[in-house]
Image (cartoon, grey):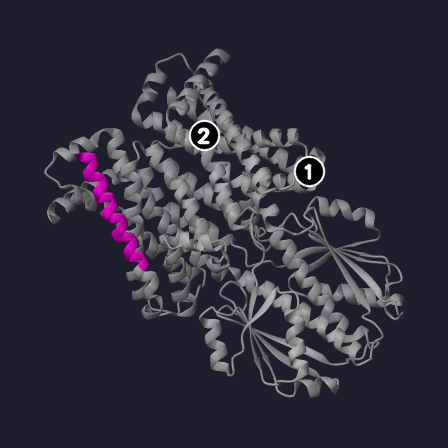
Amino acid sequence: MSLTRVWAVCLKEFRHIRRDSRILFLVVLSPAIMLLAFGYLFSFEVKQVRLAVLDHDHSPLSRSYVASLTSDGEIAVVAAPTGYAETDDLLRSGSADVALVIPSGMEADLFRGARVPVQLVADGSDPLTAAQNISNIAERTGAFNASLLVDRRLLAVSPLEVRSQSLYNPELKSVYSMVPGLLAVVLIVPALAVVISITREKETGSFEGLVSTPVQGTEYLLGKLAAHMVYSLVSGLVCFLVAVLWFRVPFVGDPLLLFILTVDYLVATMGFAMVVATLMSSQQAAMLVVLLMYFVPSFFLTGLIVPVNSESVQAQIAADALPATHFVAICRSLFLKGIGLAELLEPALMLAAMGVVAVAISIAAFRKEAA
Amino acid sequence: MNLHQILNLAEKEFIQVWRDKVLVVFLVFGPILQFILLAQTASSGIRHVTIAVVDMDKSKVSRQVIAALDNTPDLDVRYYLEERSSLDRLLDSGTAKLAVLIPPHFAADLSRPGGASLQLLVDGSSYLEGSTALRVAQAAIADFISRGVAGGGLDMGGIELRTMVEYNPGLNVRLHTIPAQFSFIVFQISFLVAALSVARERELGTLEQLQMTPIGQLDLLLGKAVLAAVVGMANFAAVLALSIVYFQVPMRGSLLDLAALTLLFVAANIAMGLIVSVLSGTQQQALLFVFLICVLEVNVSGYLLSVNNMPVALQFLAEFSPLRHYISIVREIMLKGATLDMLWSHAVALLLLAVGSGVVVWGLLKRRAD
């Protein structure tokens, strides 16, 4: 292997990308644009819960119960239906998220010290939101029950104060958690440009020209890797700036460590891309594999949005096999927790191992083909 | 328009694809494999969030609080610690997402006038998990207090919520995500095949040859669309069968309605894919555009976040995404049993997108050829 030839391939590839403005845009800027789009999607906080109240009691107590639910504005009463059919319609049409049915005689029963069943109907068509709405109302109902006991002088003061604190993300802003995680997903794009770049040379025949030069397979692949690494790192820097300057995500970790681990991650991703590229002969097929088996799963199976399904072994295996899983964890830890390499050793080593193995496989598979 | 010529071109496309066996395998099995992978591993929701408890009181009451938390289906108390110091490592490493700190003399303080306090620490770096766990824990504790502690174990009465969930009683997230994954599979495959079609001919230099033949511009596009439509519909049939038979997603509506609307959806995707294809000089460019557009479509489609919860500007943009309309259609038909008259607005949107993009692509190709 000769470093000069690696350098030559790298330089050629570097110019190749630079001269094709559309590819340059897609490689360097499109990840940042995706990050903006996704970040914006996640940059608002939980929306106001729209509540419909069917009050059969019409008592001061039922009104004060509803008032206690809506006191801080997180829940708002949007309708006061008069019958069940109307309540159902509100939920079905989506104009209310949850409905409460307060039975008649609630006030009297409560003052007798009875348990009064209040029905809570939630629209389950968005289950994650529905679950949050239900526990939100359950929590407020519990607090109302406690305050009721105080009012009835069964209790001197509210006996238990629950102090909640969100670590690493004091205001519990979703954007602070999502944007660092999304970095892992958007950085797949420039890395995957590698796969197209290699299969393209095979398909358009310029590869034949390369075979006749003294450049060996290893040098060819490493040269490509190096050139794309440079563009990917520039792209990563742009994304980092978008995260920190535009979304104002705090970065409390070590920038140098982030840089090193980003390289680590990119090698793993590009290694995977190169394996696909050496096995496939057309851009179409290679791209399909990458889109289907790599990019899309990286969104959904890596714990980025919903945690990895702990009940399914397949889910665990898929998550561990995807480099993005490890980088999502690394980014969140470095941005928000600021922990050091010692705590991140496991994901870092996983990525390094994946990168080395993948690059080795692609080199092995590639040589045979060139021969 | 000449049907004969269109079919001729379509036949050529089929032969061409058929010769690339790897491509055939991936056009047919790739999406199905992906669907199985995604659907099989899809999370059923935020369940069993790991909690660490630091119980410095070790009284009956503190154990009751811990049991109340553990009894919720969403929380799992897995670590019982003696002191605060060992907690940081659990939270830093992300092993525990929520910690409950019960101070010494907790039980004794509860019966004193000043009351007692309890602290919840949540890992804010995993937003959805953290915020859900926090809410559930607060609700469980509020319920616990109002139930017994106050009256020294006596039930003093109060409001009891009886929760009922419509359309998805178990709040199973999978029933929500599988229709979206299903829609995405049909979307990406029809879009990708269409996006590559013309770009490939151009890159390999065969587009000029095609344009020299008597086939008209419109026929050329339609001939190209046939392959993408067949691949799209074949994938639709496969993933639909898998969802119903294997993943047990209910099918409460009409199959015929769904198939008809799918055809409309595939047409819209192909028309948009052809725009990308005509605008791209090479397959490489087309592929990266497909990538970008897929990501943007997924973004606004309601796949990740329900459309109603999105900012207004994005909701407006979403109207231009075929995927957004189709995901709603699939969810409404499969889960709620919606009929065509309830879905007409989505159907009209798909039709407009298909026709509009079709006109654009035709104009583009005409201008390029002139």
Mark linked to residue A252: 1
Q: What is the three-letter code of the residue carrying label 1?
A: Val
Name the image quarter holding residue B326. bottom left
Q: How packed is label 1: few (under 14 Cα within 10 Å), some, or many (20 or more)? A: some
Comparing labels 1 and 2, the label whose residue is closer to the camera? 1
Q: How far is the residue under mark 1 from the one under mark 2?
A: 34 Å
| Residue A151: percent from left, percent from top | 78, 78
Q: Is residue B284 above or below residue A172?
A: above
For disc 2, the chain is A
Residue under pointer 2: A274
The residue stretch that appears in magenta: B349-370
For disc 1, the chain is A
- Element under disc 2: helix
Q: Is residue B194 visible?
A: no
| Residue B302: percent from left, percent from top | 45, 56
Q: How packed is label 2: few (under 14 Cα within 10 Å), some, or many (20 or more)? A: many
| Residue A259: percent from left, percent from top | 61, 29
Q: Residue at x 81, y 74 (%)?
A: B150
Q: What is the three-letter code of the residue carrying label 2?
A: Met
**Do marks 1 and 2 share a chain?**
yes
Please state the total of marks drawn on the protein image: 2
- Element under disc 1: loop
| Residue B339: percent from left, percent from top | 34, 70
Q: Residue at x 58, y 32 (%)?
A: A262
Residue B95 on the magenta span = no
